[in-house]
Structures are given as C-alpha cells and as structure tokens.
Image: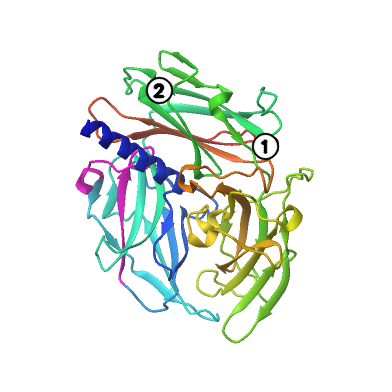
C-alpha cells in the first residue's frame, strides 16, 4: 500500500511539474534568461549527442555587481520528473562550470551585469540523451539555484515525420490542429510493447500544453503511427500579439505612451481586448518567443535599457471572467510560470492590468485563462481571450523517447519540427 501511494505521489508531482513548466526564475534580480542554438535566438535548445553543437546562454543580474555564477546539467525523464541517476552517470568531465564572461551595462538607465556562456563547455558534457535542466547557481553551491532552463540532447535512432492537418471532427475542425506522426525505429531499438515508446508533441515549444502519446494508432514491426485526432489535436490559438521595444526614443506602433525620466522608462501599451469574435488575420510572428535587439545603440546585450511595460486587457462588458484568472503568456513570462504573469483586475478601469520589466527587443505575447480553483492541474486556454482558428501558423516539435528494459531514465531517440503553414518537417 505504501509503495502504491508513493507511485501516485510521484505521478502527481511529475504532472504538476509538467503543467508549471521546466523554465523558472527563482531570484528577482535575474532577468532576460535565454538559452538557444548558437546564432539563432528564435530556436529551441537542441543538442545532438557527441556532436560539436553549441548553445548560447545569456542573462542579466540587476544588482549590477559581479558574482560567481556556475551552471550544471540535471537529467530528467520525458515528463520532467527526476531520475534516480547520479551526475557522474550523465555528465562527462566536471560536474559544473563557472561562467567567466560578463560585462556591466553602459549607456543605460538601468544598471545590470550581463553574463553569457557557450554551452556545453568541453570540460562538462552530457553523456546521455534525454531532457536536461540547465541549472545556474551561485558560489558553487547547487542549493543556491537562481534559474533553470530546459534543453534536450538527442541520439538519433529513429526516423520521425510529422504533418499538421485539419481535424475531421465537426467540433474541432475550425478551432484545432491535428498532428499526423510516424516513427520508424532502427535495429538498436527493441521494444517489448508499443507502449515502450513515448511521443511528446509541443506547440511552439511550450511544455505546459504538450501532448503525451503512449499508444500508437497503428503499430507494425518497427513502424508506429499516431493519427487519432482524439489524442493528437490541440487548440490552434491565433497569431501572437507583439510589442516592439527596440527603441525607447521613438514610439512603435503598439505603444500608447512613452515616458522617460532620469532613472526609469515607462511604456504604456495600447489597450488589448478579446479576439475571439474577430476575423483571423495572418501575419508573421515569433510564435511566442522574443529577441533582444536595439536600434538606439550598437550592442544589444549590455548597451540596451530596461523599461516598465504596462499591459491592460479589457474583457467583454468590462467585467472579470468568473472563476478564471488571466495570464500574460509567452517566453517573456516563461509561459506563465513567473509570478508577474498573472494579471490583476482593476475595477475602476474595468480591465486586467500588469507591469513587466522588459529589456529592449521584440516580444510576442498573448493572453490565456486558467481556473482559479485548481490552476496547477489545469492547462491554459485561449478560448475566452484570443480564440482559436485551425489555419493559424504554429510550429510543432515532436520528441520520441524510449526506455530500454531495466534502464533508469528515458532516452531521447528522435525528433522533428514542422510548421503548420509550410509543412516543412525537419530534424
């Protein structure tokens, strides 16, 4: 009975972690933490095992002094639950690396120190495939974690293909997008049952709304097909809203008011409203991500400033949604995991409000609702705020996991990405 309760508790913790997302910031002085493929700030951090692939890590410390920051890797399972492995089981070399590249800000009202690193360092390499948390901590003490970022390491043992289709179901065909996924394993994969493979599908690289597929629709030899729209459909949403902060001297199209004084800059965004009843309009976006850029100075990492950005969302009838909270979603709030993502209803103005401290750049964001009663166990929804349209351009990433008999962690053996608009699957 105790073992059964322990298993239930582990499953509950894993589910809650997945719903909250792996990317988190634990210290208020840490801002603009980014991890992406070298030279591509819009990409998800993917490494191929035993390759020369490199990632870039960037973050700012608003204290403005110099601290001793380190990073390390922590292997996780497909659902981001902890493994029972020790660091020497999945790290080759030293267990952590000091971040030695930093520079204090210049030509900016806001004082900060910008840190950056190339990941992985040749003295500290992941030796297994799977999900990894990159943990940044202080003074060589792993208990002083300041933030975590998710990344994946892949050892290709499968051929993965994916396609985005319109669902056949009448209730879903106008609001959802359906994935058609095929997986073909090579001779190194010996499954005892088709459930030995786990397929995870992410829309716009968001783990909180990921699909976990354990049972293929068709299974034949080393061929697996996942096409049942009851399990492979996701709400499509609409194109993401945006704010252009590349200049804090000139107002961009989404700025309603720009105020600057000696010690801070305030940007008041134009009021937003629900788009559920509006016609769908296609435009190019970043699918929820952001990039640090500037047109005011030269270097975007330590010559850009921070601004207090004031968001306001007016619900229908200027009344709060009953039993629901509204969140600012996107990479700028770690997809709702930051405390500042939750908006506060202002009864005098009849709108939801929130202020975010953002570095100069170009940002995507949207508004989503979640239940007030049991937020951790509920996925976010576009239904009340943005609406859904099946033709929306989204990027999907499909990850394939496998745990051999007797193994103690999930291996990541294949992946592919596909655009719902261009249908150009790649891996």
Q: Quadrant of the N terminus?
A: top left
- The colour scheme used here is rainbow
Q: Is residue 231 magenta?
A: no
Which SS class for mark 1?
loop
Q: Residue at x 66, y 29 (%)?
A: 172
Magenta stretch, residue numbers = 68-90
Quarter-of-image position of residue 311: bottom right
Q: Residue at x 66, y 50 (%)?
A: 240
Q: Which one is nearer the viewer's eye here, 46 or 86?
A: 86
The image shows residue 368, relative to residue 355, as above or below, that is above
Q: Is residue 326 left or right of residue 47?
A: right
The extreme bottom residue here reads 262
Checking the image for residue 421, the label placed there is 1
- Residue 25 appears at what percent x and percent y? 42, 60
Q: Which one is nearer the viewer's eye here, 248 or 257?
A: 257
Q: Residue at x 54, y 59 (%)?
A: 341
Residue 348 in sight here = yes
Residue 245 in sight here = no
- Residue 24 appears at what percent x and percent y? 42, 56
């Amino acid at each position: 009975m105790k073992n059964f309760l322990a298993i239930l508790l582990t499953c509950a913790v894993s589910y809650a972690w997945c719903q909250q997302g792996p990317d988190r910031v634990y210290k208020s002085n840490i801002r603009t933490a980014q991890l992406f493929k070298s030279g591509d700030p819009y990409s998800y951090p993917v490494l191929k095992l035993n390759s020369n692939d490199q990632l870039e890590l960037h973050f700012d410390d608003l204290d403005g002094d110099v601290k001793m920051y380190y990073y390390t890797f922590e292997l996780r399972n497909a659902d981001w639950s902890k493994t029972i492995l020790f660091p020497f089981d999945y790290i080759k070399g030293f267990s952590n690396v000091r971040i030695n590249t930093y520079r204090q800000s210049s030509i900016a009202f806001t004082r900060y120190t910008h840190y950056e690193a190339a990941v992985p360092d040749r003295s500290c390499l992941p030796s297994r495939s799977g999900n990894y948390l990159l943990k940044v901590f202080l003074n060589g003490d792993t208990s002083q974690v300041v933030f975590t970022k998710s990344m994946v390491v892949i050892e290709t043992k499968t051929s993965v293909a994916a396609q985005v289709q319109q669902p056949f179901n009448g209730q879903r065909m106008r609001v959802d997008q359906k994935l058609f996924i095929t997986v073909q394993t090579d001779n190194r994969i010996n499954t005892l049952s088709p459930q030995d493979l786990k397929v995870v599908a992410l829309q716009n690289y968001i783990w909180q709304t990921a699909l976990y597929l354990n049972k293929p629709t068709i299974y034949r030899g080393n061929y697996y097909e996942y096409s049942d729209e009851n399990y492979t459909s996701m709400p499509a949403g609409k194109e993401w809203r945006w704010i252009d902060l590349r200049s804090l001297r000139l107002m961009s199209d989404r700025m309603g008011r720009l105020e600057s004084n000696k010690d801070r800059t305030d940007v008041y965004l134009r009021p937003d409203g629900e788009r559920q009843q509006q016609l769908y309009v296609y435009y190019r976006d970043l699918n929820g991500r952001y990039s640090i850029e500037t047109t005011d100075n030269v270097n975007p990492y330590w010559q850009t400033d921070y601004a207090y950005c004031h968001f306001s969302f007016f619900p229908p009838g200027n009344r709060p949604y009953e039993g629901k909270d509204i969140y600012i979603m996107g990479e700028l709030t770690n997809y709702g995991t930051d405390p500042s993502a939750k908006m506060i209803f202002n009864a005098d103005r009849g709108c939801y409000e929130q202020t975010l401290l953002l570095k100069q750049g170009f940002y995507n964001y949207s508004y989503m609702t979640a239940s007030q009663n049991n937020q951790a166990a509920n996925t976010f929804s576009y239904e009340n705020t943005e609406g859904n349209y099946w033709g929306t351009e989204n990027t999907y990433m499909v990850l394939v996991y496998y745990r051999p008999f007797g193994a103690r962690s999930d291996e990541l053996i294949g992946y592919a990405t596909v655009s719902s608009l261009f249908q150009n699957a790649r891996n």
